[in-house]
């Protein structure tokens, strides 16, 4: 009897504002906004959603105002459910956010000036395409940082990969050799990163930034000296698009997931392999050990620096493939600063994804989705000014990182050089 | 172990610094080359006329106004070997002012700036050096007597392109997007929209323009002039809505549109004839040409021959009438465009030149 009173006295009362309650409240507020504001702004015109990659063909239509209100209520309901049950965090959050987005679409499409339909197949396809370089880039980041090396040089890896792909693809008239060269380009920057960060224990963020400007300078210089003078050095052609029979005909997802170049399929494969390998193989265990506590790993006989070198180089291969996207998938030539900062968005995707491959993958898709949606809504002149549409991915990031991710923790030894015997 | 491991980061930092410097040096080397070595002309000693240019951040090879302005310099030099030409690059906007004042100190007789963003810096430099002839492309002179403005009524040529696009489209939808919402970009889009509207009036059709609303002055933008993947995404979105003619006004980003046209849509290029400056002639219906090359070449040549006297500050206005702006030849599409449509476009051109039709845009030079 006394024992039980003691027990209850010792247990601290749980804070009322748990993460689930906070998120639930935010989602509920968003739901109210959607119901009231979007509902009021929407017109009674129907919003159409077609399933293919263009606006012709089968479509589903939802009356604008009704849709905005109903989906707003769904968002609200899911928010309340999370607030009161404090369970199934991911499920309620996804339902609520998805309903919020659909409610906003019902409003915007019902007021669009130059169209009344958006093609969901196209939206999915543009989402995956825009996410591809971010997926490769963020997995490159994961490979480095899980092993304790900060990789700010993703942008440089992508850019060098894009350049090598264009140059070698043009010279050999073979896009496949271009693809291999892209990987080598990424490895080149990786090797420099490893050399300075591991061998010479230089501050890793600084060296990453230096490598980015180095990549920008050298590719820009070679572009002017070689490619601009002779277009034959800058026409790599594009990687072939493969459609998987039957599966590519699936509405909405078919054109996005089962139609694409080798880089589309490769991205899914890389994410799966890295996710499994990090948690289920000896290599993965050692990599994580080296990233968390290199001295302990060393004591147990893991070759810390060797493993770091190997992982950083592997990251270069992955990011290099991502670079090929820019010069052989979305375009058929290299131009100066072609990647335009995608490497930094990839870095954000990695952090947003909590240094986990699946998380980074989802974050990349999220960024890709925000960008693709902004383009599609812009093409039908919805009431939101273009400047706001272009901000969409970044606003989404701020909300996501601030509100949804919660506490993120990098590997403990991330960015800390390790020297044996110290 | 002690000394070796302590010194290593220092040594590493030194190597990294060398790498950084060499990388940046390459950027600089790539961007600015010194005056083309004066092979014959400047042997005339100190009498050479020094014409200098400051690029904006797009760099000398932007496939756009920096490139065509520099081409104007080269053209002037090839006509008059007494002209010495050189340029310096601005890699960021805060370099405009120091670049301009450096050139003034290097005894340049003629200093060319490019683009509206350099307007203020150019006026300030011109005030400080009243004896030097300044000139600016795509911007007014802010009532500064020694600045010669070179501007274009681009909306006139874009109007013809809009009419052409509307007449060529099978789907009844045409699209456009811009790099940034700034006057030198939106002026193309305004003229394009008006041209389509004219076609609808003449033919009783209802061809729709996606991507730009002239009344609201808002539309689709990549917010960037280099990212080809962004250009591709915008044109995929437009094509998804059914547009089968697309005009990107986004510099290098527009290449992503041209590269992925396939059989989905055809492209109207801008600035310099896309058949000469890109590898995508087979999908380029025509180009809205802004002939800055000739405008600049004329200004430099004239300034050189009347060395010491300033040019009139009324400047140069490129119009359809003086061929400062034009619609490029149809090249590979020549046989695919209806002869009647071509004749109508010629007729419109004559009407604009004669003043029977006025094409206006909020972005046009005053």
Image (tube, coloured by chain):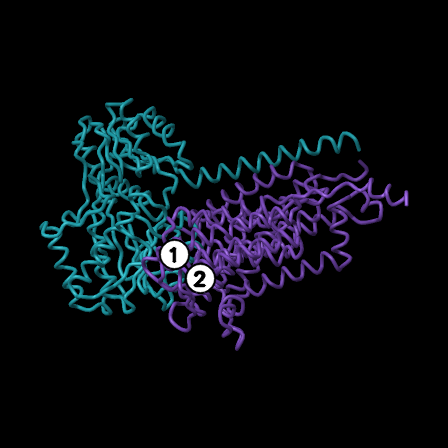
Chain colours: A purple, B cyan
A269 or A422: which is nearer to us? A269
Quadrant housing residue B6: top right
Secondary element at image label 1: loop
**Spot occupied by residue A320 in the image (x, y as percentages of width and height):** 57, 54
Q: Is residue B44 visible?
A: no
How far from the left and from the top, in percent, is residue B270? 29, 52
Coordinates of residue B128 in the picture (x, y in percent):
29, 22
The image quadrant that residue A382 belongs to is bottom left
Number of residues whose C-alpha sits closer than 10 Å to that of mark 2, classed few (under 14), some (14–19) or many (20 or more): many
- Given the current orientation, which residue lies at the most extreme front position? A1
Circle 2: element type: helix
Q: Please identify the quadrant where the N terminus of chain A is shown.
A: top right
**Residue located at (25% from left, 53% from top):** B288
Q: Residue at x 30, y 26 (%)?
A: B124
Identify which residue, A405 or B323, lies in the foreground.
A405
Q: Which residue is mark 2?
A: A67
Dot 2 or dot 1: first in sequence order is 1
């Amino acid at each position: 009897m006394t024992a039980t009173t003691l027990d209850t006295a010792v247990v601290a009362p749980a804070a009322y504002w748990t993460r689930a309650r906070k998120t639930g409240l935010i989602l509920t507020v968003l739901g109210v906004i959607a119901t009231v504001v979007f509902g009021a702004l929407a017109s009674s015109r129907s919003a159409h959603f077609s399933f293919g990659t263009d606006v012709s063909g089968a479509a589903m239509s939802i009356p604008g105002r009704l849709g905005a209100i109903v989906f707003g209520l769904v968002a609200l309901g899911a928010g309340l459910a999370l607030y009161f049950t404090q369970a199934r965090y991911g499920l309620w959050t996804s339902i609520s956010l998805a309903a919020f987005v659909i409610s906003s679409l019902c409003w915007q499409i019902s007021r669009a000036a130059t169209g009344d339909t958006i093609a969901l197949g196209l939206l999915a396809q543009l989402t995956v395409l825009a996410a591809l370089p971010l997926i490769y880039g963020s997995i490159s980041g994961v490979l480095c940082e899980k092993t304790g090396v900060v990789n700010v040089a993703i942008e440089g890896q992508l850019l060098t990969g894009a350049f090598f792909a264009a140059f070698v693809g043009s010279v050999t008239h073979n896009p496949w050799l271009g693809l291999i060269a892209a990987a080598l380009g990424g490895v080149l920057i990786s090797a420099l990163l490893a050399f300075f960060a591991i061998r010479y224990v230089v501050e890793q963020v600084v060296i990453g930034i230096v490598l980015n400007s180095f990549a920008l300078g050298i590719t820009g210089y070679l572009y002017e000296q070689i490619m601009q003078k002779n277009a034959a050095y800058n026409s790599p052609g594009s990687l072939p698009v493969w459609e998987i029979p039957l599966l590519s005909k699936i509405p909405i997802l078919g054109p996005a997931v089962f139609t694409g170049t080798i880089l589309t399929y490769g991205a899914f494969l890389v994410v799966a392999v890295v996710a499994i390998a990090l948690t289920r193989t000896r290599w993965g265990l050692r990599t994580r050990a080296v990233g968390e506590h290199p001295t302990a790993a060393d004591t147990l006989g893991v070759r810390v620096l060797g493993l770091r070198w190997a992982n950083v180089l592997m990251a270069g291969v992955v990011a290099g493939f991502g670079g090929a996207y820019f010069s052989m998938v979305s375009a058929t030539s290299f131009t100066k600063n072609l990647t335009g900062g995608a490497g930094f968005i990839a870095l954000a995707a990695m952090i947003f994804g909590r240094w986990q491959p699946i998380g980074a993958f989802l974050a990349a898709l999220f960024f890709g989705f925000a960008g693709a949606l902004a383009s599609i809504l812009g093409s039908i002149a919805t009431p939101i000014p273009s400047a706001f549409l272009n901000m969409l991915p970044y606003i989404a990031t701020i909300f996501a990182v601030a509100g949804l991710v919660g506490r993120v923790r990098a590997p403990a030894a991330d960015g800390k050089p390790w020297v044996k015997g110290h | 172990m002690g000394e070796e491991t302590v010194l290593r980061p220092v040594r590493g930092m030194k190597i990294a610094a060398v790498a950084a410097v060499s990388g940046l040096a390459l950027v600089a080397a790539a961007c600015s080359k010194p005056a083309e070595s004066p092979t014959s002309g400047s042997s005339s000693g100190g009498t050479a006329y020094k014409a200098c240019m400051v690029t904006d951040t797009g760099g000398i090879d932007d496939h756009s106004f920096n490139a065509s302005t520099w081409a104007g310099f080269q053209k002037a030099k090839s006509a008059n070997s007494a002209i010495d030409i050189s340029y310096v690059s601005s890699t960021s906007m805060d370099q405009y002012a120091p670049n301009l004042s450096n050139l003034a100190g290097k005894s340049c007789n003629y200093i060319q700036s490019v683009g509206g963003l350099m307007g203020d810096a150019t006026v300030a430099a011109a005030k400080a050096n009243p004896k030097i002839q300044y000139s600016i492309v795509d911007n007014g002179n802010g009532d500064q007597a020694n600045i010669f403005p070179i501007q274009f009524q681009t909306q006139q040529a874009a109007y013809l392109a809009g009419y052409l696009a509307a007449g060529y489209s099978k789907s009844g939808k045409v699209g456009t997007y811009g790099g940034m919402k700034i006057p030198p970009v939106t002026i193309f889009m305004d003229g394009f929209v008006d041209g389509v509207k004219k076609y609808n009036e003449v033919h009783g059709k209802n061809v729709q323009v996606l991507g730009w609303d002239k009344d609201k002055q808002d539309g689709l933008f990549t917010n960037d002039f280099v990212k080809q993947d962004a250009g591709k995404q915008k044109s995929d979105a437009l094509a998804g809505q059914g547009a089968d003619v697309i005009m990107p006004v986004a510099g290098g980003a527009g290449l992503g549109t041209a590269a992925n046209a396939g059989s989905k849509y055809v492209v109207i290029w801008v600035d310099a004839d896309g058949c000469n400056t890109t590898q995508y002639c087979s999908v380029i219906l025509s180009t809205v040409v802004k002939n800055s090359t000739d405008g600049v070449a004329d200004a430099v040549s004239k300034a050189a021959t009347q060395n010491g006297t300033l040019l009139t500050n009324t400047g140069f206005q490129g119009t359809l009438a003086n061929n400062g702006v034009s619609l490029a030849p149809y090249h590979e599409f020549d046989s695919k465009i209806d002869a009647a449509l071509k004749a109508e476009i010629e007729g419109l051109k004559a009407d604009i030149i004669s003043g029977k039709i006025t094409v206006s845009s909020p972005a046009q030079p005053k």
